Amino acid sequence: MIRISKLKNGMRLITDSDEKAQTVSIGVWVGVGARFETAENNGISHVLEHMAFKGTKTRSAYDISSAIENVGGIMNAYTGRDVTAYYVKVLKEDVALGIDLIADILQHSVMAPAELAKEQGVIVQEINMQNDTPDDLVFDYFNQAAYPDQPLGRSILGTAEKVQSFTSAHVLDYMRQNYQAANMVISAAGAVHHSDFLALCEKLFVEIGSNPAPVAVASRYQGGEKRVQKAHEQVNLVLGFEGVSYEHPDYYAANVLASILGGGMSSRLFQEIREKRGLVYSIYAFHSPESDTGTFGVYAGTGEEQVCELMPVLCDEIARLGSSLSEEELARAKAKLKARLLMRLENITAHAESNALDLLMRGRVISETELIQKIEAVQRSDLEALADRIFSGAPVLAALGPIQNLMSYEQIRERVCPVLN
């Protein structure tokens, strides 16, 4: 059962209780991520996420990790563009310890210079690892081309130079300015009792700031391309368009459309490009929403020679999607989305995360029943109209590898949407 309360300091708290569960997932989701940064402090949200575990006024980094592992628990965090999250999963008898650890790192972290110096080295290694992973790096290039010269287009990790320039004061100041009660949600799912958990949180979260929540810079999507020639074995590429936000009426239609185009082995792209033609090992479509925008695109990894044949076929599949949809494809895509949703939400950590993100992004929790109803409500006419609108916009291309045989941006744009040319 889902219950929502608000702490005296303004933080929202949501519990999703399951009496049969033996464990509980607890976390704090903060409505601040990489898109709240400036060009000067790009990467600091991710540095802060790392440093929160590196010692508080009463616990060392070892104390934090050993406390959770002494009870068999798991503690982790992640940084996104709109959100940063800190969470634990523990046995039901360890709820108090779990939430105490999170409250401690979010209010009493000291950001010791010696610890920061070590963690900066770790993060630089993480950046280097991503730079050596072309199927990850190409998505950074895609965002740079889609949202140039703005926070949404910058890497979540930042650059090695930026990361190494931050001082403890920089990180602490960023935390104090941006981690405010108004944009923080405490979420717990599983073996949790709402009133008891609320009482715990009231005692523990007493030093969170009460200033207005920070506001992200509005996005400005722009078509274009970023090509990087590298002596790799494969060409990694992303071809995409402006999608829709979490709150857009076409959000669910966009997910259905992505599933039909490239969501699984029965999808159009997999069947036509991998199964029939053998041009790729990996190809899929995606819809990635943000708070005020989104991207709809296709990732493919292919060989230096195969890219010549791949791109015309890929463009043609995108161009004909809206005018050739079948009821069979629509039904299959809906079934896949519903099944994946329900399978994911069998995990209590996924429940805690989903509830928190709903409150942060939408201001309310959308139930499983409502989610299924929204997926079921998508009609073929909705998909046709959405495809026409998305694919008539300026495309974005990011490509990395031996790309000398890749067709030009102008050729791609004309092939996808010839009426604009």
Image: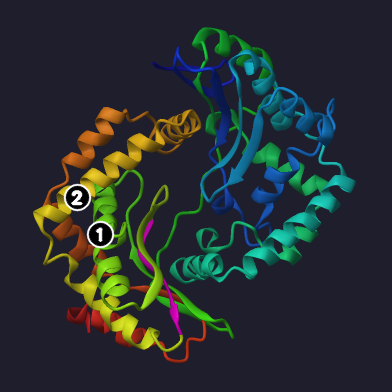
Does residue 345 show up magenta in the picture? no
Looking at the rendered structure, the secondary structure element under dot 1 is: loop
Q: Are marks 1 and 2 in contact (CB under 8 Å)?
A: yes
Residue interval drawn in magenta: 294-303
Q: Please rate how many residues cluster around mark 2, counting C-alpha atoms within 10 Å: few if below 14, some from 14 to 19, many from 20.
A: some
Q: Amino acid at mark 2?
A: Arg
Say if 230 sits above or below 27 in the image.
below
Identify the residue at horizontal 85%, vertical 45% (top origin): 115
Rendered location of residue 277, percent (x, y): 29, 78
Q: Quadrant of the C terminus?
A: bottom left
Say if 378 sits above or below 353 in the image.
below
Identify the residue at horizontal 18%, vertical 67% (top origin): 321
Rendered image quadrant of residue 42: bottom right
Rendered location of residue 207, percent (x, y): 70, 23
- For the residue pair 111 and 330, the one nearer the viewer reads as 330
Rendered image quadrant of residue 284: bottom left
Q: Given the current orientation, which residue lies at the most extreme bottom position? A: 404
The label on residue 8 is: none
Left or right relative to 383: residue 140? right
Q: Quadrant of the N terminus?
A: top left
The label on residue 266 is: 1
Does residue 295 show up magenta in the picture? yes
Looking at the rendered structure, the secondary structure element under dot 2 is: helix
- For the residue pair 211 and 372, the one nearer the viewer reads as 372
Residue holding disc 2 = 332
Q: Main secondary structure of the magenta part?
A: strand
Q: Amino acid at mark 1?
A: Ser
- Going from N to C along the chain, the mark reached first, 1 or 2, is 1
Rendered image quadrant of residue 416: bottom left
Identify the residue at horizontal 73%, vertical 38% (top origin): 52
Left or right relative to 96: residue 228? left
The answer to whether residue 206 of the structure is visible from this angle is no
